[in-house]
Image (cartoon, helix red, strand yellow):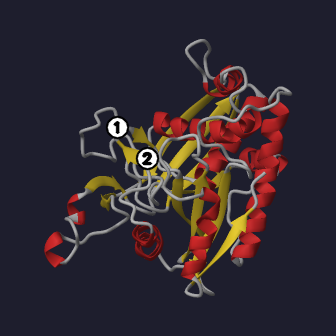
Amino acid sequence: MKTLYLQAEVLTPLVIAGAAPRSSDVLAEGLRPPSLRGAMRWWFRAMMGSIVGAHDNYKTLRSLEGRVFGSTNQSSSIRLRTCLDKGAKDTAYLCMNDQRAKKFGAPKDYNKIQKPGIAPNGQVIIYLESQSHTEFALALCSLWLTAMLGGVGNRSRRGFGSLALSPKGSSTVRVTQHLNLDFSYPDKPLKDIAEFLESNLKQIYSFFKHYAPAVSPVAPKFFVLSKTQAKLWLIEPRDRFWTSWQEAMNELRDNFYRFYKTSFNLSAIGSANPRFASPLIIQIKRVALTRYFGVLLAFDHSWYNQQWWSSWKQLEKFLNKLLPAYEYQEVMLP
């Protein structure tokens, strides 16, 4: 049994629930393995779905996912454990850190839309164990996608639950180097960060494609991470990084997310009834202390009966409205 471990630093408030969802003691259990495993499965499906799609009525995808993470018919080939090493409880304002009360001119009491969470700078230790080298590599790639592009927990599509991973121990470092995966964003301009992501995503795509059978993918009806069905951009203020996660989230909320909705007279991007997850992920990442940038990932959802922009590919035209106050860089997906 091979065991690797990584340290995860909480970058933005981590809003999670324990075995007792109504409990406010978020530190009792910390980041539970089922929550992290669920996020990893989602990103595995997004990447593998770009390769096998809906082949054989999704049976091919479910079989490949089951070999790594388990299913009702087979056990998981990996074991995932977590441990909250350091953490403080904090209040997370779920409307992208909007703390305004209605009496101060806000359209509603945003400060009442809140939940307890683990504050930034918290530390979680993640252990991965497996006897299978192939499935182990795919699980590690899924963890990379979770941390580098997404987040974990409540409101992870709106900036919360961002993690920064650091491989720990000589064996863990050797494995990540052998897989040619880098878990640290380079402290460089957006163009270089985009090239860094493209290189790692290309490597991850090759692992997934090698693992998949040779099939002709049928277009799936879910979000997949491919250049034909998604767009990925990095964004920051012109000629600088944001100096804190709060500054990044506040500006992305007002100057991007809400500005976009107002421009197109949208009440929401996504649906609560019927339930449909937002096709737009807004995340916040860090290259160094006090140096943050945004990640914008938009998925094709033409197969769904409601549209939130005339074409998801045209979101770049809206980004041009933010110039010259902001700059953005597209990341070419595999």
Q: Nearer the viewer, residue 209 or 265?
A: 265
Q: Is residue 233 visible?
A: yes
Asked if 137 appears above or below 62 in the picture, the reply is below
Which circle marks residue 153 in the picture? 2
Q: Position of residue 245 (x, y in %)?
A: 46, 71
The residue labelled by disc 1 is 18
Q: Position of residue 155 (x, y in %)?
A: 41, 52
**Amino acid of disc 2:** Gly
For marks 1 and 2, give the CA distance.
11 Å
Q: Residue at x 57, y 33 (%)?
A: 80
* Residue 55 placement, left or right of 257: right
Q: Position of residue 307 (x, y in %)?
A: 50, 51
Q: Position of residue 318 (x, y in %)?
A: 56, 72
User: Element at badge 2?
Assistant: loop
**Amino acid of disc 1:** Gly
Q: Residue at x 82, y 49 (%)?
A: 203
Asked if 330 appears above or below 146 in the picture, the reply is below
